[in-house]
Every structure is written in structure tokens, then in C-alpha cells.
Image (spheres, rainbow, N blue to C red):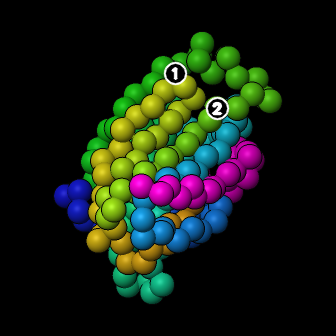
């Protein structure tokens, strides 16, 4: 799939109704930074979860665009779930990694989208590590609104037990 394809992957597209939403923000015409972050509890998390900022269409026949990952906590893999870019990165996992998180400890998961003119330049943070995510143009969006979403890959599983302290905000810049 090309980076400019706006169709959701079959797996993410089939569970779109099962994702929890955490708000919607309209992108401004000028420069800005959009941030969506949650703390996940590895002890409570499913093995795989979705996390992203999606441009959801007003009508169901229109394509969905934006940025989304599938995080595989069991294998330590971060996959692009939206644009077909494949494996974005890996992180340390296994029994020693899992044992560092007790029932109350969380792991930061954060998307930052820098908007420079029509370009959307994302980075993904998992804990203290940063991963690059390929850029998109606002020309590929149906509207200027992005919706923050997260959820389990397994259908019907609510994000609330493992997604804590969601925060979603826009910071506009003068330049």
C-alpha cells in the first residue's frame, strides 16, 4: 500500500467502532503542534493495542486518513496500522521488561504531530524512546479535524482499563 493511500488496513478498519475516542481537534491553517498521549498499564493491557490520530469522514463511504499504530507489547513491535508503512520500530520486552511494571506503574504513549504549512510531521514516543512516523500532507485529509483514538486489537475490549490519563491538545505557533 502506498503512503498516500487513505484506506484503513482491514484489521483497524474492522474494529473502528470498538475504539475509544478521546476528543477531536481542528487543525489551524498555520503552524502548530498537536499532541495526544495516554499512560498505559502493561499489567492491564492487552497484548496488542491501537493508538492514533485519525481524520474520520463525515460519511462512511469516504476513506479514513491519519496516523495510527498497532503496538504489540508481547513481541515489542510498533506497526503502522494506517498507511501501510510496515514495522516502525521495536522495543525491549519480555519477562524482565514486564516485571518492571507493577499494577500501578504506567508507560507513556504519545503522538506529536508538527504541522508546518500543509505538512504533518509525526513522532511517536513510547516510554523514553522516540520513533519516527512517515509524514503526510493535509491534502490527504477529508476535513481539518483529527480524532484521538485508542483501543484493544481484540474486538469488544474497552480501552478504559489500560488507558489512563488521556490528554489531547493543540499548541499554535507564530512561525
* Coordinates of residue 21 in the picture (x, y in percent): 63, 64
Q: Which numbered disc covers residue 93? A: 1
Location of residue 84 with respect to 88 vertically, above or below:
below
Would residue 38 appear left or right of 73 to someone viewing this image?
right
Would residue 116 appear left or right of 74 to someone viewing this image?
left
Residue drawn at the location 50% of the way across and 46% of the way down: 111
Q: Which numbered disc covers residue 107? A: 2
Residue drawn at the location 70% of the way across and 32% of the way down: 106
Quarter of the image where one finds residue 110: top right
> What stretch of residues is rendered in magenta?
149-175
Q: CA distance from mark 2 to mark 1?
A: 13 Å
Answer few, some or many: residues within 10 Å of disc 2's Cα (few below 14, many 20 plus, some between 14 and 19): some
* Coordinates of residue 140 in the picture (x, y in percent): 30, 70
Location of residue 33 with respect to 25 vertically, above or below:
above
* Coordinates of residue 96 in the picture (x, y in percent): 60, 13
Answer few, some or many: residues within 10 Å of disc 1's Cα (few below 14, many 20 plus, some between 14 and 19): some
- Membership of 164 in magenta stretch: yes
Amino acid at each position: 500500500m502506498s503512503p498516500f493511500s487513505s484506506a484503513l488496513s482491514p484489521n483497524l478498519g474492522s474494529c473502528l467502532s470498538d475504539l475509544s475516542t478521546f476528543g477531536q481537534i481542528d487543525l489551524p491553517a498555520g503552524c502548530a503542534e498537536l499532541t495526544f498521549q495516554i499512560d498505559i498499564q502493561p499489567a492491564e493491557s492487552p497484548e496488542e493495542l491501537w493508538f492514533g490520530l485519525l481524520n474520520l469522514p463525515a460519511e462512511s463511504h469516504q476513506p479514513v486518513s491519519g496516523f495510527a499504530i498497532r503496538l504489540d507489547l508481547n513481541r515489542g513491535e510498533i506497526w503502522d496500522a494506517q498507511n501501510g508503512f510496515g514495522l516502525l520500530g521495536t522495543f525491549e520486552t519480555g519477562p524482565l521488561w514486564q516485571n518492571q511494571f507493577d499494577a500501578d506503574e504506567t508507560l507513556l504513549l504519545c503522538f506529536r504531530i508538527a504541522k508546518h504549512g500543509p505538512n504533518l510531521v509525526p513522532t511517536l514516543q513510547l516510554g523514553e524512546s522516540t520513533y519516527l512516523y512517515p509524514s503526510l500532507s493535509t491534502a490527504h485529509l477529508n476535513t481539518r479535524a483529527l480524532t484521538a483514538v485508542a483501543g484493544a486489537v481484540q474486538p469488544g475490549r474497552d480501552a478504559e482499563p489500560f488507558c489512563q490519563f488521556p490528554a489531547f491538545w493543540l499548541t499554535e505557533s507564530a512561525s
